[in-house]
Image (spheres, rainbow, N blue to C red):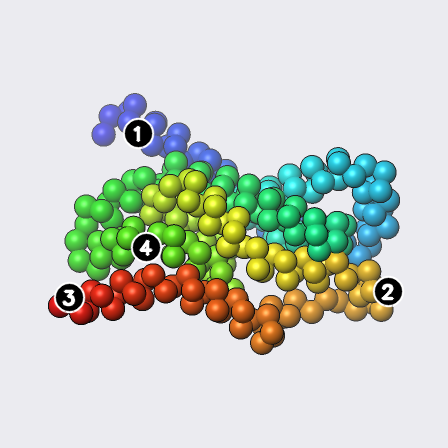
Amino acid sequence: MDDTTTRSAWGRRVPIIVIAAVALIGAFTLRDYLSFDALARNRAELLAFRDANYLASVAGFVAAYAAIVAFSLPGATIATLTGGFLFATFPGALYNITGATLGAIAIFLAARWGLGERLSARMTAGEGLIRRIKTGIDENQWSMLFLIRLVPAVPFFVANLVPAFMNVALWRFAVSTFLGIIPGAVVYTSVGAGLGEVFARGETPDLGIVFEPHILLPILGLCLLAALPILIKALRGRKGL
C-alpha cells in the first residue's frame, strides 16, 4: 500500500475518530450537565427562554439533540424528557424524533465513510457464517432496520453503527430510523411533558414505564410485525428444502 492510499484510508477514518474522541471526553465532562438534576435546577430559565424565543428554542434544541446522538454523548434520555417538558408531547415528540434522526444520520455517514464500505466488501467476499449473516440482512433490510429500532434492548448507537457496516442505503436508514423510534420517543416525551408535576413533588420520573405491559406489549407487537417477512421467508426456505 503506497503513502497516498494510506493517507486516504486514515483521512476517511478521521470523522469516526473525532466522534469517538468527543464521546470519550463527553462521558467524563458532560455527565453533570446532561442530567435530570441539571434540568430540574434550570427549568425556570429554560421555560422563560422558550417563551421569549420559541423558534430559536426549537432550532437550538433539535441541534443539541442531534449533537448528543451524533457524538454518542450521555444524556439522550434527558434530552427526550426535556423535549416533552419544553414543548409538550406534541410537537415535542416530533422535535425529539427529528433531532435523533439527524444525529443518527451523522454518525451513520461517519461510520460508513470510515469503515463501513470496507467491512461490507469483506463480508460479501467472505464465506461461511459471516457471508450468510450478510446475505440474510441484505435480503431483509427493511425488517431488520425496523427491528433494531423497535426492540428496547438494542442500544441506540448500536442501531446506528450496524447498518453502516452493512452498507445500507442512506435513505432506508433515515426512513427506518425516523419511523422506528416513534413509539419509544412518544412514550418518553409524554413522561417529559409531565415533569412539571414531578418537579413539584421533588421526585424523579419513572423511566421504566416503557417496560410496563400496556406500553411494552404494543411495541413487541410492532417488533413481531417487522419480523414477519423474515419468518415467512424462513418458512418458505424450509419448505423448499
Q: Earlier in the sequence, mark 1 or mark 4?
A: 1
131 left or right of 36? left
**Residue lying at 86% horizontally and 65% vertically, measured from the top left:** 200
Residue wearing tag 3: 240
Whether residue 239 appears in this view of the structure is yes
Instruction: Give above or below for 110 relative to 192.
Output: above
**Residue lying at 65% horizontally and 52% vertically, measured from the top left:** 93
Q: Residues within 10 Å of mark 3 (few under 14, many from 20)?
A: few
Instruction: Tell me, for residue 140, which label it has, or none.
Output: 4
Q: CA distance from mark 4 to mark 3?
A: 18 Å
The image quadrant of residue 63 is top right
Q: CA distance from mark 2 to mark 4?
A: 48 Å
**Residue lying at 38% horizontally and 63% vertically, measured from the top left:** 227
Marks 2/4 in contact by CB < 8 Å: the verdict is no
Q: Amino acid at mark 4?
A: Asn
Q: Position of residue 89 (x, y in %)?
A: 71, 55
Q: Earlier in the sequence, mark 1 or mark 2?
A: 1
Q: Amino acid at mark 3?
A: Gly
Residue closest to the far top: 4
Residue wearing tag 2: 200
